[in-house]
Amino acid sequence: MGLIKSAVSYISGEIKKVVQLGVEVGVVVGGGNIWRGSEASVEGMERAVADYVGMLATVMNSMILQSTLENSVNVDTRVLSAIDIRQISETYIRRRAIRHLEKGRVGFYLRQVLGIHI
């Protein structure tokens, strides 16, 4: 498991192409390449703990994509999370997420936000 640099570069390039078309882009990111909470819970870890570790894996993936998009292909982004980690991401607030899209920023929505209407 893990990230493949060529895949991150490819995905970032594809996102940039869509942004250049004038499309408001929101990306729902997961962390399954780093951690799968469902597998860990089967092996004795509490499911809630396993899920939180998965959320942190999702944050890691979002930060990697954010850094690549902003530093390599010059696309403005924001990471938004339903769990409070202010040093890394903005807390997900629907109206703020919409405003970022309207400003042309790519929003990375961590998987745990899916239960909230984007």
Image: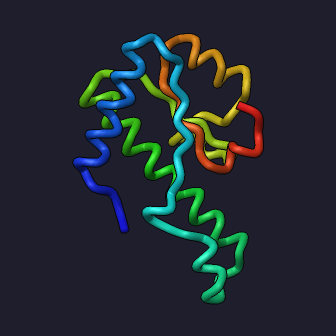
Residue closer to the observer: 50 or 9: 9
Q: Residue at x 28, y 39 (%)?
A: 10
Above or below for 99 versus 27: above
Q: Residue at x 59, y 79 (%)?
A: 40
Q: In the image, is 67 to the left or to the right of 80?
A: left
Above or below for 11 versus 93: below
Snapshot quadrant of residue 47? bottom right
Q: Residue at x 51, y 24 (%)?
A: 25
Q: Residue at x 59, y 57 (%)?
A: 55
Q: Position of residue 92 (x, y in %)?
A: 68, 34
Above or below for 90 versus 5: above
Q: In the image, is 73 to the left or to the right of 54?
A: left
Q: Residue furthest bottom?
A: 44
Q: Residue furthest right?
A: 116
Q: Position of residue 109 (x, y in %)?
A: 59, 39
Q: Position of residue 2 (x, y in %)?
A: 35, 63
Snapshot quadrant of residue 51? bottom right
